[in-house]
Image (cartoon, rainbow, N blue to C red):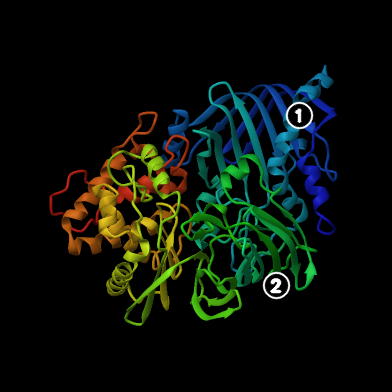
Amino acid sequence: MTQGPILPLYRALRGVGLDPQQVFKIREATIDREDVHLFLNDGTIAFTQAVDGRVTGAFFEGDGEVLVRPPDRRERASLGLFTGQGVLEEHVTSVYLRFNDDTASELKPYLRPAGDTANFVSHADSAARQLAMIDAMRLAISFSSLPATVAPGEVGPPTDRMLHARIATPRLGTFDVYYDTLAAEQIIVGQVASVRDIAYYDLWLSFSMRSLRDHQATASRFKGPTGPAWTRDALSVTDYKIQAAIDSSFSLSATADLGGEVRQGGARILMFELSRYLQLKSVELAGRPLEFIQNEAVEGSQLARHGNDVVAVVFPAPVKLGEHVQLKFAYSGSVLSDAGGGLFYVGARGTWYPNRGIAMARYDITFRFPSAYTLVATGKRVSLEKQGAETVGHWISDGEIPIAGFNLGRYIESSATAGGVEVHSYATRSVEAALPQAAQEAAVSTPQSGVSPEGVMSAPVSVSSPTPAAGSPSLVRRAANTVTQLDNMLGAFPFNSLALTQRPGPDSQGWPGIIFLSSYVYLTPEERAAAHVGAADSVLYASVMMPHEVAHQWFGDRVSWASYHEQWLLEALANYSAIMLLEKTSLSDVEVMLQAYRQLLASKTRDGVTNVQAGPVTLGLRLSSSKFPNGYEIITYGRCFATPLARPRNPPAPTSCL
């Protein structure tokens, strides 16, 4: 469907059931997709009803096998962590198949008439309909697109082929096997798992298919993250112009104008990320309304895998290579969270503007907000004007940056300079209401000694009227000094200014030109001492966390990662920079931090397995799983600085990770 509404097609694909007239016995059938091999030895299979003339699925019960051979040691170790084996070779009792190709025709030679077809459809149809929603958007993209076109000399995506098998086995339970040529890594095997009511999607395997592995150096993953899956390279957004308003109830309403260029022609549906707490009202292409589908697009295991809310924007016809696209989104909702103590933040509520993932672009942002509050945003503030009970501020990014953010609070400002760079700090007179409670809960879920990789306190806290604003003048001076020192080490500071802003909770984040710092960083040494903060956490909040986030201005905000396999480098380089600065003033504090990292790696999960066994740093976010909930943070922050496990009292600069 390269023209006309997509929603009817999408909903038909999302709810399709089994066809009572297409039930067969099947024997000795094989489905081979590069590294994926599925054997339907003997059983019954029912195909789904046709949608727009296409059969897109089937449900099999009987005797079968699945075989997937990992291509390297890393993937074999990852598979072994979850299955106990280096090769996925399992007996199968049932399989739900979804595909966008000729799989149904491929299986025809192995089909025979079946007996009690009605009974089979009766007990299998409900499960088939529930599973149909998982791949509905992926199929809608396939059926509405033309073959991809790319610029001369560019490498385009392979032919669009997709097979998803939801497999039930006696030993491993139910898991997914994906073969998807439009994915960044075409072979994926994973399983939904829960720990303490938290859902994880454990990625057992994720790698490039055999035919691409020899050409990986030219694959699109080395261009960096450029958008949500399936259409990630189709559109490059170069400019954002956002007009946002925060009302007295702290609801956000906004329009976002996105300008960009089509880098791969042929797609009719493009995916954008946007928080589920924001209701999209309209999308326009050069003033013309477009069809869109919000938050229906990713369901079930797909949501667990991707972790983001998405919007599917439908163009009138497939986009053409090289054409300029100008989109306008209008949306509103309660994306801000009130943390108490005069602090508001977007936080876990997700992405506050429509985007195609972390990718370099220019930003022009205007905020209108209640004048009783201060708003700090990404970019250089070019104007700030009070208009009655509201204030209007305007920010423009220093060139291209990968992401934009803001914070709102009843802040008190402190300032300093580092050469030509202005440094500002914004802190409140009190901490957020939940801070002591959050610290106590964190102490239960993280190792009892040492530092949490996210900066979580390692001992229960009872803070008596802490005042972050009191520590702000000292903090901003130290931040300016850090900018100067890193400027000498790494080159010129990447932006014209730097804003530090208090963030609720125990963790911090460094964004382009703005750092969201945990309230604990703003506490004075006396307040931290009164709070009974442990030795490692005290060093972390006093001397490591702020320099680490400042270093991210170079590593992460001006330079991004090519794929999740390289993401750890940015954290390692930021932490390495912070530890190098700390080494100049206190070798004993360096040793405290290194020992804390060693203790984290040696700490054990609830199953009694040491966290160091989560895997190599190149697994990236895959390190965090149902078996190792804090795996990514512990490995990424600790592994570089914890080897060798014995260091002299006055260690040299920690260069072992590089």
Looking at this view, is 551 or 203 the one in front?
551
Amino acid residing under circle 1: Ser
Residue 551, quarter of picture: bottom left
Secondary structure state at the residue bearing disc 1: helix
Q: How many marks?
A: 2
State left or right for residue 619 relative to residue 350: left
**Residue 5 on image: x %, y %:** 83, 56
State left or right for residue 297 relative to residue 346: right
Q: Name the quadrant of the C terminus.
A: bottom left
Q: CA distance from mark 1 to mark 2?
A: 42 Å
Q: Residue furthest front?
A: 465
Image point 77% across, 51% down: which residue?
Answer: 143
Residue under label 1: 126
In the displayed structure, 299 sits above or below 82; it is below
Question: In this view of the protein, can residue 426 be seen by the observer?
Answer: yes
**Residue 630 on image: x %, y %:** 41, 42
**Which comes before the other along the chain, label 1 or label 2?**
1
Residue under label 2: 326
Amino acid residing under circle 2: Gln
